Image (cartoon, helix red, strand yellow):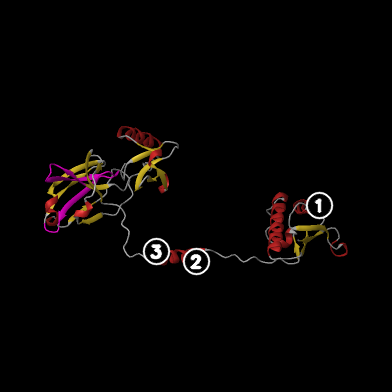
Amino acid sequence: MNIGDKVRLLHGKESGVIVGLKGAIVEIEIEDGFTIPVSKSEIVLISPEENKRFNKEETSKEDSKTNIIKEVKATKGLYWAFVALNDQKFTLYFINNTDWDIPFSISTEKQGILAGFLTSKTHIRVHEVSLSQLDNWGTYILQCLYYQKGYFELQEPFIKKLKFRANQFKSLQDVPLVQKKGYLFQIDKEEIPQNIDVAKIAEQMLEKAADKIEIKKIEKPAPEVDLHIETLLPNNTKQMNPDEILKYQVQVFEKALDNAIATGMDEIVFIHGVGNGTLKYEIQKKVSKHPNIEFYKDAQKNKFGYGATYLKLK
């Protein structure tokens, strides 16, 4: 398995593209850009024939107006591989295991070596080299553009300078697409900056996160909250039907009660009027089983009659 290979989960519906390899763990990019870690034993490669069939199915489901295919695309998977010709010479291959077609040029700092157009999931022979002459290779310069027919999201051009050292040629690996053993180098993997201050970066991330947290101050309600709709919405009741008015009054009541509890109030009175008793019933139904209410009763009758409810908070 290599970066850029398409895979499917054995015990799930997800499929995607390999974007990272960490020992026995494979990082797979699925739809919408999400990346999930999966054990190698839990995935299987999607064959080229199956992938073509998969593409056709996805294309049939695409929006006919935008012509955008929703398949996950492999944007990583460029390799150089050195495959032995004999005990002295190696063939250098440039491998495109991405889903992009790539116009490219390869040169050293002194002269050009090869230029061309490498289609998706193909490879090309660059030239022959001798590892014994490695110190004389100089620096390779690779330049690529990313291209697809039809609609595609623009990608940044890729430029890479490659200087090889003897200690990099450690072990032979399976070379993708070439189907031979060789010394394999992924050239488009993300590089980790040297001398990075992890603690400082973490501190900066926490500071930015803290700046985005909006601290909401809880407003302490008045000791007596008037729920008459004329008081709550003096200019906006003409277009409201009785159900809408009741719903709004209950919302105001619930918010005021929550704020009273959160701010440590001992008691509060809600003025709901007599009317047909519907609002009073809704209020007393909600407070009868409320865990933060010690008891409730009609408020001062000499002041409110039967049009208010007193709550004793815990």
Crowding near the residue tagged with mark 3, few <14, some 14–19, many ≥20 C-alpha atoms within 10 Å: few
Q: Amino acid at mark 3?
A: Val
Q: Horizontal placement of 284 versus 39: left or right?
A: right
The image quarter in which residue 218 lies: bottom right
The residue segment tinted magenta is: 81-110
Q: Earlier in the sequence, mark 1 or mark 2?
A: 2
Residue 124 placed where, x, y %?
18, 43
Name the residue tied to disc 2: 211
Residue 277's label in the rendered image is: 1
Tell me the distance, in whole angstroms, between the alpha carbons under discs 1 and 2: 47 Å
Q: Amino acid at mark 2?
A: Asp
- One can see residue 233 in this view: no
Residue 112 placed where, x, y %?
12, 53
Name the residue tied to disc 3: 198
Say if the magenta span includes residue 305: no
Crowding near the residue tagged with mark 2, few <14, some 14–19, many ≥20 C-alpha atoms within 10 Å: few
